[in-house]
Image: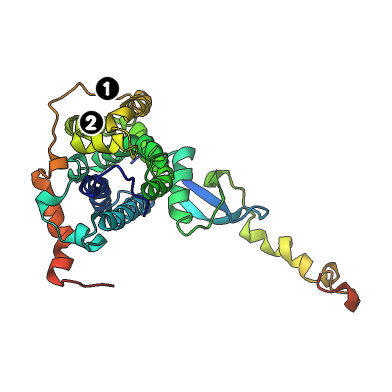
């Protein structure tokens, strides 16, 4: 196992779980649309993206289990932790809302992850770099798919524009948390595994500015930022999400396909 | 939704280099960019494709089923057009 020598295992495990939880929770949110999408085509597209995200989460959880070295596997991390042990950012747990909310959330998250995955793919941790290399292509498509919808809804009918503007207003407070820095991100950056998230802010801003200008959307004013997810402090929506995500494994412990 | 805001597009997928694009179905989409995305999401989930074409269904000109007999029956009596009347020497092998 090619763990960078100069990082302690607990720090790397925390970093991997943050990434994995972002992808599991957003994948779960997208999967909630399955069978309910506004178009048959989107009913396939959203689960496609959900499966990309859950696949990334699985690879990250497996690696986190190896690094942690306490015998926990992907199911233990995904299904058998308590709410405060999930370290995802708050944006990914926000309820789906309408289709505009879901597409904007997807677009923003992918616009953040894509440049970060690119940097992680060049990082010093070989296992994580391999996961990143696959995720770069998947997140590039998520930007394109969700971005085209942001453009068409933002510059669409009066109602679609109103809904997309509403989504921007509702989700803007959760953007800042994506770029938060703390002792974990700092240690990971110093070990050369992943640069501080703030280093991809300019790439994120460029992607967003380009799509927003085509979408005739106003870039949001800086708002009161919401945070706490990285420390396990979640919004009210998270408990309901976990109840659905975990109930099968909690009801039938150890159940497998 | 107003008529024609989400027109129909025919989807053609090329499975491998060297093969022709083949019709595989249709999608509804607002424009050509969204039609390509929808085609990708609906028809290439199992690794079916290396290239996608989408064409507005309205752009396809189809033969009239009412003219089926005059179009196609004259060919049925001309079996000599099939290249099956030659003796191929064994040495040639599979053609």
Q: Viewed as shown, does residue B19 lie left or right of A178? A: right
Mark 1 packing: few (<14 Cα in 10 Å), some, or many (20+)? few
For mark 2, what is the residue? Answer: A168
Helix, strand or loop under label 1: loop
Residue A189's place in the image compared with A246, above or below, is above
Q: Quadrant of residue B5?
A: top left
Q: Which mark is residue A218?
A: 1
Residue A162's place in the image compared with A117, above or below, is above
Residue A204's place in the image compared with A22, above or below, is above
- Kindly identify which chain the residue marked by label 2 belongs to: A
Residue at the spot 13% in from the left edge and 33% down from the top edge: A226
Quadrant occupied by the C terminus of chain A:
bottom left
User: Residue A8 at what x, y percent from top left?
Assistant: 24, 46
Helix, strand or loop under label 2: helix
Q: Are marks 2 and 1 in contact (CB under 8 Å)?
A: yes
- Kindly identify which chain the residue marked by label 1 belongs to: A
User: Residue A132 at what x, y percent from top left?
Assistant: 39, 45
Q: Viewed as shown, does residue A68 lie left or right of A204? A: left
Q: Residue furthest bottom?
A: B90
Mark 2 packing: few (<14 Cα in 10 Å), some, or many (20+)? some
């Amino acid at each position: 196992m090619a763990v960078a020598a100069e990082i302690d295992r607990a720090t790397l495990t925390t970093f991997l779980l943050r990434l994995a939880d972002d992808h599991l929770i957003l994948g779960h949110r997208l999967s909630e649309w399955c069978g309910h999408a506004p178009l048959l085509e989107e009913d396939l597209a959203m689960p496609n993206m959900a499966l990309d995200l859950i696949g990334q989460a699985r690879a990250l959880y497996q690696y986190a289990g190896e690094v942690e070295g306490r015998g926990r596997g992907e199911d233990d991390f995904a299904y058998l932790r308590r709410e405060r042990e999930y370290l995802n950012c708050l944006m990914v747990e926000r309820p789906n809302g309408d289709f505009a909310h879901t597409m904007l959330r997807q677009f923003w998250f992918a616009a953040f992850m894509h440049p970060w995955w690119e940097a992680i793919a060049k990082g010093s941790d070989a296992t994580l770099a391999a996961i990143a290399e696959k995720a770069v292509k998947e997140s590039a498509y998520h930007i394109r798919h969700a971005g085209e919808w942001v453009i068409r809804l933002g510059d669409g009918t009066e109602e679609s524009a109103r809904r997309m503007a509403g989504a921007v207003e509702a989700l803007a407070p959760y953007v800042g948390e994506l770029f938060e820095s703390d002792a974990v991100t700092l240690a990971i950056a110093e070990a050369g595994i992943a640069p501080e998230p703030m280093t991809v802010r300019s790439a994120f801003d460029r992607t967003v500015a380009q799509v927003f200008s085509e979408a005739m959307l106003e870039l949001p004013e800086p708002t009161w930022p919401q945070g706490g997810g990285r420390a396990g402090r979640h919004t009210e929506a998270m408990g309901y999400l976990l109840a659905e995500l975990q109930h099968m494994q909690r009801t039938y412990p150890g159940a497998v396909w | 939704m107003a008529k024609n805001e989400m027109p129909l597009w025919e989807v053609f997928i090329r499975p491998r280099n060297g093969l022709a694009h083949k019709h595989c179905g249709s999608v509804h989409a607002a424009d050509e960019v969204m039609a390509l995305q929808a085609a990708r999401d609906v028809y290439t989930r199992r690794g079916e494709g290396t290239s996608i074409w989408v064409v507005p269904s309205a752009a396809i000109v189809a033969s009239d089923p009412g003219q089926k007999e005059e179009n196609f029956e004259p060919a049925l009596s001309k079996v000599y057009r099939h290249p099956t009347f030659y003796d191929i020497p064994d040495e040639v092998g599979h053609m």
